[in-house]
Image (cartoon, coloured by chain):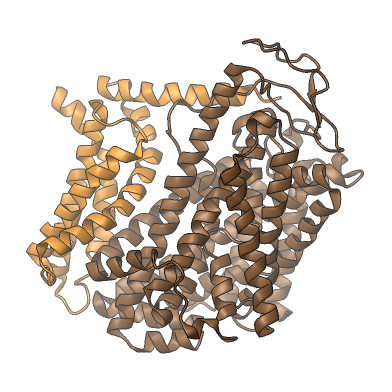
Chain colours: A orange, B brown
Amino acid sequence: MIGRHSLELALPGASIGAVAGAVAGGLTLFAGAPTGMATLSALALAVPLAFFGGLYGVLLGHGVFRPGTFGPVGLYWMAAFPVSRLVQETLYGVGTADGVLTFLAYQAMVSLGFAIGFLWMHERLMPHWLMRRAADNPIAEQLLGTYLRYARLVSARKGARK
Amino acid sequence: MDTSNTPPATATPPVEDGRVWKAGRLEPMPIRKLPDAPPSVHLLGPTVFLVALGVGMGESYMWPRLVLLFGPEIRWLFLVGVTLQAVVMLEMARYAMATGESIFTGAARVFKPLMWFFFIVAIAVYIWPGHLSAGAAALEQITGIPWMITAICGLLLVGVVFTLAKVIYNLLENVLSLLIGALVLGTAIVAAMVGQWSDVVSTISGMFAVGYLPDEAMTAAWFPVIVGACAFAGPSGMQQMWYTLHLRDSGAGMGAHIPKVRGLRHAGEEEEMPNRGFMFDTEDPAEMAKWKGWRRWVTFDALLLFWGITMLVTISFTVIAQSAARLNPGVREALLADDQEAALTAMSNAVSSAGSSVLGVVFLGFIALIGLNATLGLFDSFSRGQADMTFNFVPGAKKLGMSRLYAIFLWAVIAFGILILLFGPADGPASILDTLAFLSTFAMGAYCVTLLLVNNRMLPKPIRPKWWSNAIIGFGAVFYLGMLFYSMVAFGVVVG
């Protein structure tokens, strides 16, 4: 059941990716485009972003990433975000007018912003999800432990208030 | 300005041993233990407030406007402005984390009238509801509800929320975090959709065109606008000073020894607020190691969260503006005419034509979101700052307690805001924003001077700023005050 346990950790990241992708991605072709086409465009961005978002959660559970550290997450999205956008543009976009490399370079740059927003939201949602799953999921329990150790240090600090 | 009792260099000094640090004429600060710094560069600290306050009209309107008018090279001034603000943030944090006192109390330790100056400037600058209007106008575009109604409802909502909150800091941090998270994610995706590589290259390379100032920029019409935009790069006015209150309330450094401000409904549960901060034993290597940890923590906040997000949002909005001007020449004309509403609408239309009408709505939604962030942050910070000064320095105010004072200032500023919106000189959304700029810029020059005095005279030697940091803050004072007065003397105009 290791697979299921790991997959559960993917939920917060996958949700953030999916919502971000769907909301903004779906808008590009909305006007003048048939609804079906617009939905496909939204999906074409939401699915890869959800996939990479979820993968981040799984890797976090396996200790590849440390909670809340930005550097590695920035590098991760620098690769994952341009790929997601490329998938969308290739399938349902207007194409990459400036050439693929320039397109990817631009997207990589913007991805850093996406990474900050993603990490920011992920750090807000993940602990709540872990608290729900910790009882049945050892990986979630372990990761929650990491968050709790941090929280305890903070509360010990605040407990010292006079 | 000396410790009355030189602390012995022991690894574990007793927690309460009667030693004090004398700073200025106010009550000396007792020596207490510095708490441990967070174990890693883990979490978002109170910088979230500074980001929420800082990412405002400067980033979403003023700078994109200057870039379209003068070319991307003008952005070197933005780089100077934001970098300067990052250093100011680190120095503000130095005093607040070392003492648990706000910079206002620090100023009073140097010279009390200095603090009253800021008290008065805060009232003069921040009681006007101008910051609400741009966001509310954007909301009017989306929903059709008149902006004044949204603005008044927004004011009342802010008051109710902060009155009911048990511990205001926690509530505000959570709300602002989600809003900023949405803003950052959304801005990044919209920029990814509508922008091009060449826009980013020109925007970023423009940041390093140091010294570029076209002839047009040196005219009475434009120089004041540029000064205003420099002051609005990142947090403007007194926002940096308020940041020290948030640091204290979040328990950063010696702020851990100070109780939190509560909402009015829970004011009765408030712990007793001490009337001075605390100092740690700077002769103790173990304490100094912890101090270094705190400095690392706040430096991370300053560089990544503050500097990074401010840069990111501005670059994104500039890219969006450039794409918008390419698609719709009306954008440039509206910007040139300084018609903020028309320019934002034109930008929104251009974004719509690139993607869809919904994308235009998303753009206006961001403007409304920025307005909401700024309003939440400003009202809270203003009330916090005024309550702090009143509590510590107005005789008899201590009886009321910090939380009640906070509520009084909060509701006073809300009531005044509503009156001004209904009957006052606020004849249109953008018109009130501009009048604040002079005092706002002046306060920034003044706090640079205050910071130099406070950090170099009120802190023990081992934790005073380095020479280069002093040099940068000194440059800040010259930068803000110099440009402000040059604008007045050379062109007879205050900032635009």
Taking B38 as reference, is B269 left or right? right
> Where residue B28 sits: x, y (%)?
82, 30
In the rendered view, tell whether residue B283 sits above or below residue B354. above
In the rendered view, tell whether residue B96 sits above or below residue A158. below
User: Which residue corresponds to the image point at 34% horizontal and 64% vertical from the top-left?
Assistant: B204
User: Which residue corresponds to the image point at 73% horizontal and 46% vertical from the top-left?
Assistant: B453
Taking B385 as reference, is B222 left or right? left
User: Which residue corresponds to the image point at 77% horizontal and 53% vertical from the top-left?
Assistant: B408
> Where residue A125 sits: x, y (%)?
37, 39
Toward which corner of the image does residue B283 lie, by quadrant?
top right
> Where residue B414 sits: x, y (%)?
70, 63
Toward which corner of the image does residue B358 lie, by quadrant?
bottom left
> Where residue B126 sits: x, y (%)?
69, 64
Residue B176 seen in render: yes
Taking A93 as reference, is B284 left or right? right
In the rendered view, tell whether residue B490 sits above or below residue B278. below
Foreground pick, B149 / B298: B298
Toward which corner of the image does residue B264 lie, by quadrant?
top right
Taking B202 as reference, is B391 left or right? right
Foreground pick, B59 / B267: B59
